[in-house]
Amino acid sequence: MLVISPDNNSEPIWFNVSKWRISVLKNPPPTLHDVLTLNASNDNKYLAILSVGEGHPVIDIILVSDVLSDLKPSFSYSLDPYPGDVTIVEWNAHALHVKSDMLLTHRINDGRVPGALMLFSAESFVLDVETGKIEPISESLKDPIAYYGNHLLETPDEYSPVTELSAMDVLNGKEAIPYLQTALKRKRYIKYQADIIEVIERLKKSYNKPSSADAKSSAAD
């Protein structure tokens, strides 16, 4: 397999290269402009493609058989870390090991991770292609609120807590409140107290809302 990314921002050109001939694919995989990495699973069933467009990387996974037969993808899976980064590490059976500076376990309806869930360094994740489930390798990421909460309390004095506050706001878990209340007592966060209190109040309101069942019961009374 050979891919050429033209300089004129047109679509990449895919070639099927065999011992006897070279042919241009009529149904090339859907990728961004610059194709950087092609990585097949150990059994050659899946092909992971890392491509970049305007500096933004995406991983697309398709069936090797579809590419070799020049068919439109019958299976496709995309991993879009925008606004962060992602790289391919390796395959282990049908699990793809990747590294990203986004919390890939918390993708929303459009397949992307909320921009607030940026990590403090690139971390490893494993994607089970056949189930679509993504798991972090690091134990610290298995409890995201603790990950951001501990970072909030352990950073140097000159550090801004904006990243942690935004992340805990998006994660919307009441377990974040003790971390935020502790941060309020730190002198280094005096100028951020209003921001911290605002997040605490939002989290409290979110968990103090009556359930639909309670609302119906009150209406009946």
Image: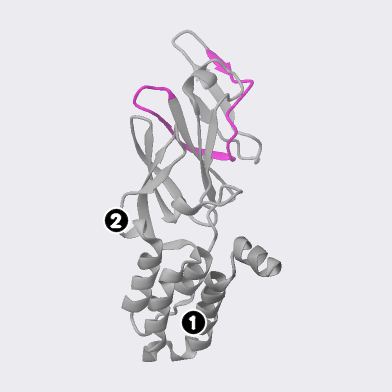
Would residue 148 be found to the left or right of residue 206 on screen? left
Where residue 192 appears, as percent x and y from the top left, is: 48, 86
* Residue 159 picture quarter: bottom left
* Residue 188 picture quarter: bottom left
Q: Secondary structure at mark 1?
A: helix
| Label ID, residue 154 | none
57 above or below 47? Answer: below
36 above or below 57? Answer: above
154 above or below 120? Answer: below
Q: Is residue 130 visible?
A: yes
* Residue 96 picture quarter: top left
Earlier in the chain: of badge 1 and badge 2, it is 2
Which amino acid is tagged 2? Glu
Q: Residue at x 57, y 35 (%)?
A: 5
Q: Residue at x 48, y 67 (%)?
A: 167
Give the residue furthest to the left: 139
Q: Residue at x 35, y 85 (%)?
A: 157
Where residue 179 appears, as percent x and y from the top left, is: 38, 77
Quadrant of the frame with the C terminus: bottom right
Check if residue 27 falls in the magenta segment: yes
**Camera-nearest residue between 42 and 175:** 175
Circle 2 Cα neighbour tier, 10 Å, few/some/many (<14 / 14–19 / ≥20): few
Where residue 38 appears, as percent x and y from the top left, is: 44, 32
Q: Which residues are magenta?
A: 22-45
Where residue 149 appears, as percent x and y from the top left, is: 38, 72
Which amino acid is tagged 1? Ile
Give the residue furthest to the front: 221
- Tell me the CA gap for discs 1 and 2: 26 Å
Q: Which residue is mark 1?
A: 196
Q: Which residue is mark 2?
A: 139
46 above or below 165? Answer: above
